[in-house]
Image (tube, rainbow, N blue to C red):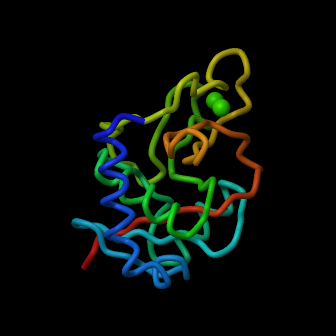
Amino acid sequence: MSALRWLASLLATAALAAASTESCSETWISFGESSFLLSSGNASWFDAFTECHRLGGKLASIQSQRENDFLHGMLTVCGVDKAWIGLTDAFINTVFKWADKEDLTFLNFGPGEPSGSGDHASEDCVEMRQDLEYQWNDEYCMVKRRFLCRKSTE
Ligand SMILES: [Ca+2]
Ligand SMILES: [Ca+2]
């Protein structure tokens, strides 16, 4: 990790530390013009998609490095090593789309990822992973993970 990246993630983590108990208990946490929620339970990507709707949001898109740093901090504070985000190529292989229909303006796959977008078409859902420094990995959609939801802050 570069020094700058490290510092940014440290700051994001520090900003979250004050609200750590709250952010780890399935509560909407405001960041910029959006709020994010970390699930308390595990679910397949598709069940996570449904569950975020039930909670009043959508499976989270990540639209900037700042947002990625913020969520990196949230997952670090809460001790979560893998979490679903709202990116998938389940509909057209290798064409990744956000579940909330936002434009794909920011991409943050880790080295060698997405690995299942070529001949191995079965990895169609995207997670943030600690072992990729919370960059992204495509994974089998039926694997159960904690997940991140997003909504506009009223
Ligand atoms: Ca795929
Ligand atoms: Ca992969």
Query: Residue 112, image x and y in percent?
Result: 58, 22
The quarter of the picture where the N terminus appears is top left
How many marks overall? 0
Give above or below for 122 relative to 82.
above
Who is closer to the viewer here, 154 or 110?
110
Residue sitting farthest toward the top: 119
Query: Residue 51, image x and y in percent?
Result: 60, 70
Who is closer to the viewer here, 121 or 17?
17
Query: Residue 127, image x and y in percent?
Result: 58, 47
Residue sitting farthest toward the front: 3
Q: Which residue is at 30% across, 50% downward?
A: 8
Who is closer to the viewer here, 78 or 32?
78
The quarter of the picture where the C terminus appears is bottom left
Which quarter of the picture shows residue 70?
bottom left
Query: Residue 61, image x and y in percent?
Result: 41, 52
Determine whether, in the image, residue 35 is placed left or right of residue 144. left
Q: Which residue is at 71% across, 63% downward?
A: 43
- Quarter holding ligand 1: top right
Which quarter of the picture shows residue 39?
bottom right
